[in-house]
Amino acid sequence: MVICTFEDGGQGKLRHVVVDGLIISKNKILLIKRASHLTNPNKYGLPGGYLNRDETTIEAIQREILEETGYTCKKVTLFTIIDDPNRRGEDRQNVEFCFVIEPGKKISKPDNESSAIKWFDLNKLPKEEDFAFDHFERVQMYLKSLFL
């Protein structure tokens, strides 16, 4: 929770805004392995993170994808918004904006938040227990949307 002071001097507890990306190319998804110094270490997850002050959610996901994978974003499409205040595996409340990303060029190396990045066939994903947070659920939601 974020403690915020309003114009009238009152304070309130607000939720964080986070962005996550489903990077999809040729029936594969790019997942990051979270570094050992982070929450949910050595687990696979979607690249993403917190929205910074003065940036849009699209700017945030483009930044996070580049930082954590080294890829640029060719196309960014909002997939879903998750506002469940009790998201599984979370140690703080947040609202997630999840995007489907068509990757562009790989122009840099991942930052220190990713110990590895790996492309997985959408039919051969890591086990659910190998995923951080509720990211496995987000991938399953995406897969179900393909067959509607």
Image (spheres, rainbow, N blue to C red):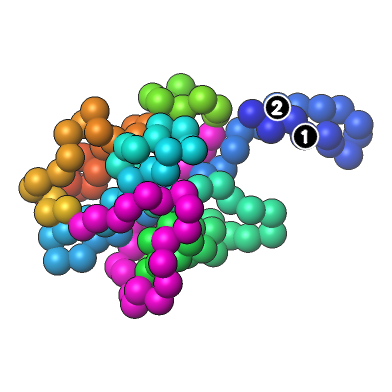
Number of other residues with Cα within 10 Å of mark 1, as a class: few under 14, some 14 to 19, many 20 or more: few
Does the image show residue 148?
A: no
- Residue type pointed to by label 1: Cys
Residue 100: image quadrant is: bottom left
Name the residue: 55% across, 28% down: 93
Residue at the extreme right: 9
Q: Residues within 10 Å of mark 2 (few under 14, many from 20)?
A: few
Q: Are marks 2 and 1 in contact (CB under 8 Å)?
A: yes
| Residue 19 locus on image (x, y percent) | 47, 49
Q: At x 21% / y 31%, what residue is drawn?
A: 128
The residue nearer to you, when weighing 67 against 10, is 67
Q: Decide whether the magenta segment is chiefly helix, strand or loop.
A: strand
Does residue 89 belong to the magenta stretch?
no
Task: Locate residue 17: give its quadrant.
Answer: top right
Query: Quick one: label 2 or label 1, which is nearer the N terminus?
Result: 1
Q: Label 2: which residue? A: 13
Label 2 SS: strand
Q: Locate residue 94, reporting x and y percent.
A: 53, 34
Stretch in magenta: 94-119
What secondary structure is marked by label 1?
Answer: strand
Relative image position of residue 108 (x, y in whole percent): 42, 72
Task: Point out the image quarter for the N terminus.
Answer: top right
Is residue 69 visible to the viewer in this orientation of the structure?
Answer: yes
* Residue 78: quarter of image: bottom left
- In this view, the residue in front, 88 or 115, is 115
Residue where numbered disc 1 is placed: 4
Q: CA distance from mark 2 to mark 1?
A: 6 Å
Amino acid at dot 2: Lys
